[in-house]
Image (cartoon, rainbow, N blue to C red):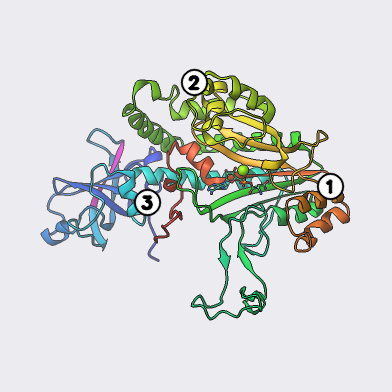
Amino acid sequence: MFNKRTRIKEILLSDNVNYQTTVMGWVRTFRNTQFIALNDGSTNNNLQVVVALGSLDESTLKRITTGACIKATGEIIASLGKGQKVELTANEIEILGDSDAEKFPLQPKKHSLEFLREIAHLRFRTNTFGAIFRVRHSLAFAIHEFFNKKGFVYLHTPVITASDAEGAGEMFKVTTLPLDGTAPKNEDGSINFKEDFFGRSTNLTVSGQLEGELAAMAFSDIYTFGPTFRAENSNTTRHLAEFWMIEPEMAFSDLEDNMNLAEDFIKYIIKYAMENNKEDLEFLTQRLDEEEKQKPQNERSEMNLMQKLEFVVNNSFERITYTEAIDILKDCSHNKKKKFQYIVDKWGIDLQSEHERYLVEKHFKKPVILTNYPKEIKAFYMRQNDDGKTVAAMDILAPGIGEIVGGSQREERLEKLTQRMNEMHIPTEELDWYLDTRRFGACPHAGFGLGFERIVQFVTGMGNIRDVIPFPRYPKSASF
Ligand code: 4AD
Ligand code: MG
């Protein structure tokens, strides 16, 4: 058996000393041909491995370089130096994988996030990305724990589908037809998808919601957690072409139940990370503090990362209607002084992220749930309100990010739903299976989608969504 080792986190957390053990990891630095800072990814903290003088031959010593992978065996002792409680005095060191120090792109110095994005295959080995991806892991775990405790069934919805769940037409096509112009055609010149792999035109899913609704009409409560794909040409710090989404769907629920669940859910997973990733979040708080110091005083945030998380967990989200939001925005001095790129002048406009961020960051200074949007700017499946103008939608807006959740109560009345689909030119024949839920035992139900990377951004304080997913996909980029 090879894997007989102790994780560095375990060694550093324990007060035990004077025992023999083996560690394996990657060399961060090697000082004075004696002190190795070793990291195995279990924690951001390195274990100091001390090479006993004279214990290694010259050629092995030379191979202990930044980036090299080593195995060290020796005794854990109370540290003689400052900066760590314990250290390992190694009497045996084996080089598992060499690393040419001249060529290794990660030098023991500060690298920019942009540079690290170009070497995303190596950036896991930095403190910043170590912390981010351990936090991402914890949030994913907490999501499953939250829903499992509440009795929700985890549903795997398809990645390849023939439907456009959001009706927004931002889909990546999936096909095995040749792209060289020889694909079979219909008489009118269009591609004959009957000849394609699935015998029809298919795409990557933009949301698992419609399938989720089908299952909620049997299990009561379900959630999905999987990758979703959007071919929107958005080069922003909050959009990815491939992102992960969590979509709960609950039978016997209205808009208020939906908001309550979403708020509890977000608080639960943040709290989980705060309790289980304390060191990583402290590190990320410091990182953000330093980043903030580069900004002019008036642009700096009043709270540090830890305080922001604390604040969100301990305060209720503000709940207001779209109509109230428009009134606030129309009357605010920011709008009157024409400081928005898009002026807010009338009811019915889609809110831009500058408007969302104003509400959250300047006006309420806390997460906001906006409800009852105009039906014209929302998807076909949202429940129509009695006013004939709005739908039972909700978006949750978070400080620094904007929209993190989009959801609604669903239109469970068959007639109203088909009428809205017709108005919006959504083909009812293709979604007949979806309409069956309204034909056979429909009930009030609701659900939402949380953008996983957006909540990871919020919790880690990272400004760019491309830094919270291991290998980001965005326009003109699909490396690794
Ligand atoms: O608001 P959206 O489009 O809602 C839906 O897809 C619904 N079917 C959800 C539901 O009710 N079950 O997307 C939901 C969330 C957004 O609030 C945002 O956080 C995230 O998904 N999101 C993206 N995240 C990263 N990159 C993108 N391109 C995103 N588009 C949406
Ligand atoms: Mg949305």
Circle 1 packing at 10 Å, graded few (<14), some (14-19), many (20+), is some
Q: Tell me where residue 383 appears, x and y as whole percent.
A: 78, 42
Residue 24 visible, this orientation: no
Residue to which mark 2 is pinned: 337
Q: Which amino acid does the dot numbered 1 rest on?
A: Lys
Instruction: Judge left or right: residue 434 versus residue 149.
Output: right
Q: Is residue 88 magenta?
A: yes
**Label located before the other in sequence (1 or 2):** 2
Which one is in front in this view, the residue at disc 3 or the one at disc 2? 2
Does residue 203 appear to the left or right of 9 in the view shown?
right
Q: Which region of the structure is painted magenta?
A: 85-90
Label pair 1/2, CB-CB below 8 angstroms: no
Separation (CA) of disc 1 from disc 3:
50 Å
Where does residue 398 sit, x and y in percent of width and height? 55, 33
Mark 1 vs 3, N-terminal side = 3
Residue 200 seen from this side: yes
Three-letter amino acid code at disc 2?
Lys
Nearer to us: label 1 or label 2 = 2
Q: Which residue is mark 1?
A: 416
Answer above or below: position of 87 versus 64: above
| Of the pair 447 and 222, the residue shown nearer to us | 447
Dot 3: within a 10 Å radius of its alpha carbon, few (fewer than 14), some, or many (20 or more) residues?
some
* Residue 256 x, y percent position in the rendering: 75, 33
Membership of 47 in magenta stretch: no
Which mark, by number, is residue 124? 3
* Disc 3 residue type (three-letter): Phe
Residue 18 screen position, x and y as percent: 31, 43
Check the image and report above or below for 213 versus 388: below
Q: Quadrant of ligand 2?
A: top right
